[in-house]
Image (tube, grey):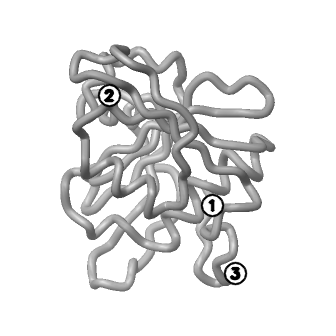
């Protein structure tokens, strides 16, 4: 997996970089238990010292909506405004998506809290659609995304 993008000081004294590609998709799938079947090769990762610490895999782009699968190594060091801007800029500004969909399995309280914190809103629940019970469908429209509003000097592009 090649590192793509520039290295930057991420505000807490650790050199971080963006990684783009299939390796990020595979890393996210291994963390989320999604069985590596996203149907995509588009992933944006955040690496620390060359090791992925967070990643987003994008799937099922249909011209207006894209699904987003997010994973991390469990730390919070990856959660920077620059990375959040990048992972939302790609679907909303580069793809031109009107909305992003995130699916969270019942019982995954950490993911539920996280996507709500990002601004996603519960749209639907699918009963008995996952081994743990229901699947919760969350959505975020471009006009609701506060992370696209960061200052120019804080942005990094994939």
Left or right of 27? Residue 145 is: right
Label 1 and label 2: CA atoms lie apart by 23 Å
Image x and y of residue 78, in percent: 33, 65
Q: Earlier in the sequence, mark 1 or mark 2?
A: 2
Q: Secondary structure at mark 2?
A: helix
Quick check: 105 above or below 121? above
Q: Secondary structure at mark 1?
A: loop
Crowding near the residue tagged with mark 3, few <14, some 14–19, many ≥20 C-alpha atoms within 10 Å? few
The residue lying toward the viewer, choosing from 18 and 139, is 139
Image x and y of residue 53, in percent: 27, 54
Q: Residue at x 54, y 22 (%)?
A: 40
Kindly identify which residue carries mark 2.
29
Q: Quadrant of the C terminus?
A: bottom right
Residue 157, numbered circle:
1
Q: Earlier in the sequence, mark 1 or mark 3?
A: 3
The residue lying toward the viewer, choosing from 47 and 29, is 29
- Say which quarter of the image contains residue 79: bottom left
Crowding near the residue tagged with mark 1, few <14, some 14–19, many ≥20 C-alpha atoms within 10 Å? some
Check whether the beta carbons of the residues at disc 1 and disc 2 lie within 8 A of each other. no
Q: Secondary structure at mark 3?
A: helix
Q: Quadrant of the N terminus?
A: top left
């Amino acid at each position: 997996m090649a590192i793509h993008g520039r290295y930057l000081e991420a505000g807490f004294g650790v050199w971080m970089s963006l990684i783009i590609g299939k390796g990020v998709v595979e890393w996210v799938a291994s963390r989320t238990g999604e069985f590596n079947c996203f149907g995509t090769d588009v992933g944006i990762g955040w690496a620390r010292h060359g090791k992925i610490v967070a990643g987003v895999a994008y799937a099922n782009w249909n011209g207006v909506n894209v699904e987003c699968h997010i994973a991390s190594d469990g730390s919070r060091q990856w959660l920077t405004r620059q990375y959040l801007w990048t992972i939302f800029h790609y679907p909303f500004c580069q793809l031109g998506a009107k909305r992003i969909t995130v699916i969270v399995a019942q019982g995954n309280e950490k993911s539920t809290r996280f996507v709500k914190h990002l601004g996603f809103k519960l749209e639907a629940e699918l009963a008995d659609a996952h081994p743990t019970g229901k699947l919760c469908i969350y959505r975020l429209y471009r006009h609701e995304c506060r992370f696209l509003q960061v200052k120019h000097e804080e942005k990094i592009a994939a």
